[in-house]
Amino acid sequence: MKPLKIIVSITLRCFVLLLLLTATAYFAFKNYWFSVTFLLSLVIMSLGELIYLVRLHLLYYQKIIVSLLHDDFSLDLNESQFKSNDETLKLYKKIKAEKQLNDSKEILYHQLLNATSSGFLILKRTEDDRKIIFMNKHFQSIFNIPKSTSWKYLKKFIPKFCETFEESDFQEIKSTFTIEIQGEERQTYIIQNSKTAIANQTYDIIILDSIQRVIDSTEKEAWMNVMKVIAHEIINSLTPIASLASTTKLYFETNELTNDDYDDIRLSLDTIINRSIHLQKFVDQYRQLTMLPDPVKTKVNIQKLIREVHHAFRHELEEKNINFVYDTSQVTIVNADRVQLEQVVINLLKNAIFSVARENIRVIRVDIKQQTNRLQIIFEDSGTFIDDAIVSKIFLPFYTTRKNGVGIGLTLSKNIVEAHNGYLYYKQSNNKKQFVIVFKS
């Protein structure tokens, strides 16, 4: 029933009850006790019926209110008992439909987040802790942990991860951290925290991604760039060769050749030969990158290797007034292919020489750092920082900013280090410009 009809119904019953009570009092005053008894029976029946009606409606609305308060939409309300156009029933149905829609959306969002290859963690701030609202499957698989609803409980499994955010007081950050999980190889991850406020509640959305996955995602684009360079070089060589060969053929198809014709033919043939040699060198360089032999590993003294390379470049360093600094006081042994590792050191030294050659301060420094399960060989020079716009391209094959550069030195060095299960990377910050070789021990 609508609220107005309910009020009218209850009012009528109260009016009838009042009439019965008035009649009972009148007959009692007249001492008509038989009539009084009969009227009292009617009063009790009317009062009971009124109480039943009021109670029925109160229970009906109480069920709906309690259901809405507790987000419980499992009630099976008997619509035949009340009209279907009852406003409270309509409200219940509307909120129930919206809740079902939101639940469907939440399931869809969870499926999407579980299908991504990044770890997702959503936290809700409470008085003494942070409640975990959502943790996707990839996050669980990265750390091999069970689902949790408490940040304090999660910290028992991955303390370093949790401390990274606690140290910044859960401020919005984007950083990296390296962690060893259950004795496996140490890995580096990108972590990002974003904050949002909804209905006076603060939420932290944490995204975790593997650096290796990010690198792999750009690999296709990198190789597309390589293919463009290769195609450019081949076309630049074959186009003049085809054109000059066709022109030379026309000369020989004429009946008489002049001295100028012979000179043009010689020039054309020289150009064809030069472009052919250039193309052959280009292919040989590409073969160096793609057909790198497997390393034949032996015990290599890093300090001795650097000293020998320094000796080979001593005259060039002296001529260009470059100060080459490295520590010879210790002995560091690495299991590597000596010839290939020497090529890496030569490439990085030549790169550093070119970088500092025109600087006022000309210093090249090599540091060796032995850490737990890590050996770092750091080439640092006083040259100008590389433009941020091209930093991501310096390891691409055939990419070079030098006038007479080939563009395979850094690529070849990177391939050699990776063949030794290590990695080579470049970084520049705090007035330091470094190429870092990392070997895993």
Image (tube, helix red, strand yellow):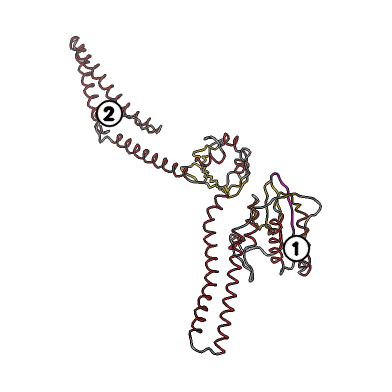
Magenta part of the chain: 361-373
- Residue 402 versus residue 137 in the image, above or below: below
Main SS of residues in magenta: strand
Magenta stretch encompasses residue 232:
no
- Residue 273 versus residue 116 in the image, above or below: below
Please rate how many residues cluster around mark 2, counting C-alpha atoms within 10 Å: few if below 14, some from 14 to 19, many from 20: few
| Label ID, residue 29 | none
User: In the rendered view of the protein, which quadrant contains the N terminus?
Assistant: top left
Residue 138, percent across and down?
51, 42
Magenta stretch encompasses residue 366:
yes
Q: Nearer the viewer, residue 234 or 169?
A: 234
Kindly state the secondary structure of the residue where label 1 is placed.
Answer: strand
Q: Are the residues tagged 1 and 2 within 8 Å (C-beta)?
A: no
| Label ID, residue 363 | 1
- Quickly name the residue at label 2: 78
In percent of the image, x 41 and y 32: which residue is there?
A: 70
